[in-house]
Amino acid sequence: MAEESSFSEFKKKFYTRVNDFSLFNFEEINLLKVVLDGLKVNYASRGKIRLFIFNSPSIINFYFLLLRFRKSLGGEKTHNFKHSIITLKNRGGIKYITVDPGGRVVEHEKQNKSFYFENIHKALDRSEVLSIAEGLKGGNLNADLRISDYSAGLIAELGSLTKDEILFLKKLTAVYKKIKASRKFEEQEELNIGIAFQQFFIQYRIWNNLLAIVKPEKVFLWPHYHREGCIYAFLKNNVKVIELQHGLIAAEDIFYVFPEQVKLIEKKALFADEIWVYGQFWKDQLLKGAGYATEQIKICGYYPFVPVPTEADKNKYLSIFPGKKIILVTTQTFTHEYFCTYIKFLSGDLSERKEPYCILVKLHPAESPDKYIAILNLENVKIVKENLDLLLSVADLHISIYSTTLFDALRYKVPNYSIFVQQYSDYIALIRDEGIAQIIQLNDNPLDFPSSKSNLKPSTFYFETFKPESLSVL
């Protein structure tokens, strides 16, 4: 398992190289966050991506035509995007848009509920909300519009480039050329920045087309990073952007807590207009850096939809390994090698010691189970997909690396353990210093270590109760 640089090291390297952010100026905004997106995500390592936006308009339009032709040959059945938006507009009364990234769906009373937006929708007047789901296949969420219903080539289905889009790409290309001419980045990094610029344009084009038809006042989405094209479309169409906290916020974070010098451009760098967080702890973290001022950070409480687990719900998990105590392991994206290595060790160690414990593994919603084939046949291990809160309600111990789930476990008073991985050492230091979890190594059994007792703050410091009235004053 090759070690990558920590988040702190990434930030230090980047801001040492770049101290004049005017390099990223584009129209009335600054593309710093788009550049960071490309460098950190490393799109070029994720397979072949066709980089087309720096070609001439005629070549781009031909590429769009080719995509549409290929789709028609394949017999792909999709809906007409613009027609769907017009139909929704004709419903009338749309004041808000909610953008659900998908993956977190809670089954409750024989219905699928959005983990992130069920309570938001209840607090608003649902008739005034246009609910949009991204990345949800199979129609497993009741949304007004599911992006997955449309072709993967949606950018091409919108037709040929308009004059405004041609000018947009001409200016974007000029910024890209200026970045390359600066010689501050290596060739692979330049490619990743180019792909991030393309993602920025694709997002902008899709959302700008939608907002040309639907005219909401506000949009609720998350996160603000990787979504700069969306945010720019909202900005251009005078739509207020409210970001909802979705995970860990720490001073070491690349996309949340920016260094002081970013304050010079924070009004132009495509942050949300406001960010709503779970509790005071997260607000304090944000205020350690640039990005958001005090008045832009609102504490709305823990807004996700968490049904109260029934005894029947709990027994479903307790009966998987009858008579065994439960060690819950919650994974994270891009960390599967570490988790597989650790779970194989822990499984064997528990069996050898004849300890009355089993291991339930809750995968991150964005992870493929294929990455965990190595642990599928372990006799005391079971991979589960269901709601985190239900799993925490039956867990005796909880293990992760640096996930927000370590904070979530505080709500259930479940003893926490964080596996030390050098790449994430800065985040893990926060978890240790806050007394959230006991730090263990990849060859440590948590049963040999007392859980952390140093955290004396109440769980409400991290997670206040959701306040629906905070939406009523919109």
Image: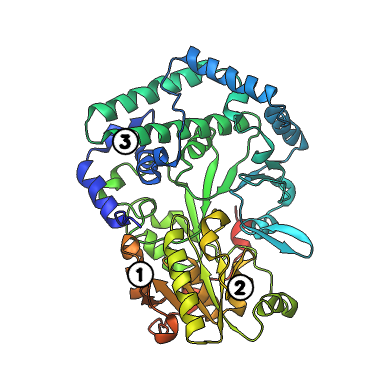
From this viewpoint, is residue 183 visible?
yes
Closer-to-camera residue (6/379): 379
- Across and down, in percent, residue 175 comes to 33, 27
Picture residue at 73% right of the left edge, 28% below the top: 83
Report which residue position mark 3 lands on.
188
**Does the residue at mark 3 contact the one at mark 2 (Cβ under 8 Å)?**
no
Badge number at residue 70: none
Q: Nearer the viewer, mark 1 or mark 2?
A: 1
- Where does the N terminus fall, quadrant-wise? bottom left
First of labels 3, 2 by sequence position: 3
- Marks 1 and 2, how far apart at CA: 23 Å
Going by the image, does 185 lie left or right of 392? left
Where residue 323 sits in the image (x, y, percent)? 64, 86
Above/below status of 176 relative to 125: above
Residue plotted at (65% across, 34% down): 214
Helix, strand, or loop for circle 1? loop
Viewer-side residue, 63 vs 302: 63
Q: Earlier in the sequence, mark 1 or mark 2?
A: 2
Q: Residues within 10 Å of mark 3 (few under 14, many from 20)?
A: some
Kind of residue sitting beneath label 1: Phe
Name the residue carrying label 1: 420
Q: Earlier in the sequence, mark 3 or mark 1?
A: 3
- Give neighbour class at mark 2: few <14, some 14-19, many 20+ (Cα, 10 Å): many
Which residue appears at 43% of the width and 45% of the height? 271
